[in-house]
Image (cartoon, rainbow, N blue to C red):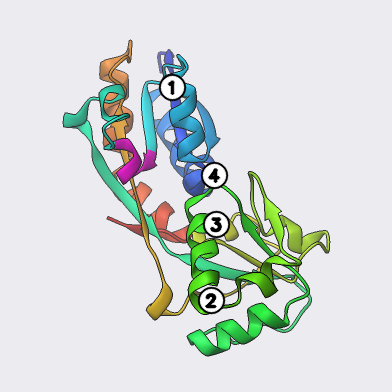
């Protein structure tokens, strides 16, 4: 198979498991096109693009890609919904899994934890900080919280920094040693949808279009499910 020019992909970290482990290797195998993938929170990706980065394809939070300040960086006609994920709770591999099936039980688990890890800048962390305020336990939980600037909060379970980790389900599952206690209860759950688009500055439109189509394929949809995402 003839090797084609590599593509540059900027991808939200919530989809890293599905893309890195399954979708991108399969795409490269099928097409002979390598993909240089860069994973970071959507807000960080947008900052890099604004500063001059020019990926061929972008995967990020749908609302962020279509925001007035960002939409000019993509070919809006190529915007393709991929998947969504809710927020979940994880614990270390060797502990009893708490019951977080209701809001009251979730509140009990959060306040009983020695430390709760959540992200400072990601959508799950921003929402969770607001949820703590709504539940009236922000001061109690934040007094000993482990705040992660970037990366997977479940890593804090493995090194003993936290008893509970809060993040999008797909991000929690990227740390396989962690045990998933469950999603947030339905009454306080929040889903984040992700979409892909070809960059307005791509120099390889045929290759970018091919990758975009593959991201919505049957194989890709199965990979999203396996990684804790719900295909669109």
Residue 174: x %, y % from top left:
60, 54
In the displayed orientation, state which residue is furthest to the right.
160
Residue 231: x %, y % from top left:
32, 56
Q: Is the residue marked by circle 4 packed among few (<14), some (14-19), or many (20+) residues within 10 Å? A: few
Q: Is the residue marked by circle 1 packed among few (<14), some (14-19), or many (20+) residues within 10 Å? A: some
- Tell me which label, 1 or 3, sits earlier in the chain: 1
The residue to which callout 2 is attached is: 182
Q: Is the residue marked by circle 3 packed among few (<14), some (14-19), or many (20+) residues within 10 Å? A: many
**Secondary structure found at label 1:** helix
Which quarter of the picture shows residue 56? top left
Closer to the camera: disc 2 or disc 1? Answer: 1
In whole angstroms, how far apart are the C-alphas of marks 1 and 3?
Answer: 23 Å
- Tell me which label, 2 or 1, sits earlier in the chain: 1
Q: Which residues are magenta?
A: 60-65
Which quarter of the picture shows residue 186? bottom left
In whole angstroms, how far apart are the C-alphas of marks 2 and 1?
Answer: 35 Å
- Tell me which label, 4 or 2, sits earlier in the chain: 4
Q: Residue at x 64, y 46 (%)?
A: 151
- Is 189 or 232 nearer to us in this picture? 189
- Tell me which label, 3 or 4, sits earlier in the chain: 4
The residue to which callout 1 is attached is: 49
Q: Residue at x 66, y 56 (%)?
A: 153
- Tell me which label, 4 or 1, sits earlier in the chain: 4
Report whether residue 33 is seen. no
Closer to the camera: disc 4 or disc 2? Answer: 2
The residue to which callout 3 is attached is: 125
């Amino acid at each position: 198979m003839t090797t084609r020019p590599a593509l540059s992909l900027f991808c939200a970290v919530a989809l890293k498991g599905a893309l890195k482990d399954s979708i991108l290797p399969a795409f490269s195998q099928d097409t002979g096109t390598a993909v240089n993938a860069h994973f970071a929170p959507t807000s960080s990706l947008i900052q890099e693009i604004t500063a001059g980065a020019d990926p061929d394809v972008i995967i990020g939070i749908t609302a962020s890609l279509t925001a007035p300040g960002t939409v000019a960086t993509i070919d809006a006609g190529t915007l393709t919904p991929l998947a969504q994920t809710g927020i979940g709770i994880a614990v270390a591999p060797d502990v009893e899994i708490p019951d977080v099936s209701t809001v009251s039980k979730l509140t009990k688990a959060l306040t009983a934890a020695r430390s709760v890890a959540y992200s400072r800048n990601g959508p799950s962390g921003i929402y969770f900080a607001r949820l703590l305020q709504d539940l009236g336990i922000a001061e109690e939980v934040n007094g000993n919280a482990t705040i992660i600037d970037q990366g997977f909060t479940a890593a804090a379970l493995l090194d003993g920094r936290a008893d509970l980790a809060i993040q999008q389900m797909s991000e929690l599952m990227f740390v396989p040693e962690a045990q998933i206690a469950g999603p947030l209860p339905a009454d306080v759950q929040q889903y984040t949808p992700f979409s892909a688009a070809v960059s307005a500055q791509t120099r390889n439109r045929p290759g970018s279009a091919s990758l975009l189509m593959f991201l919505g394929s049957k194989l890709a949809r199965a990979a999203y499910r396996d990684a804790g995402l719900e295909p669109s």
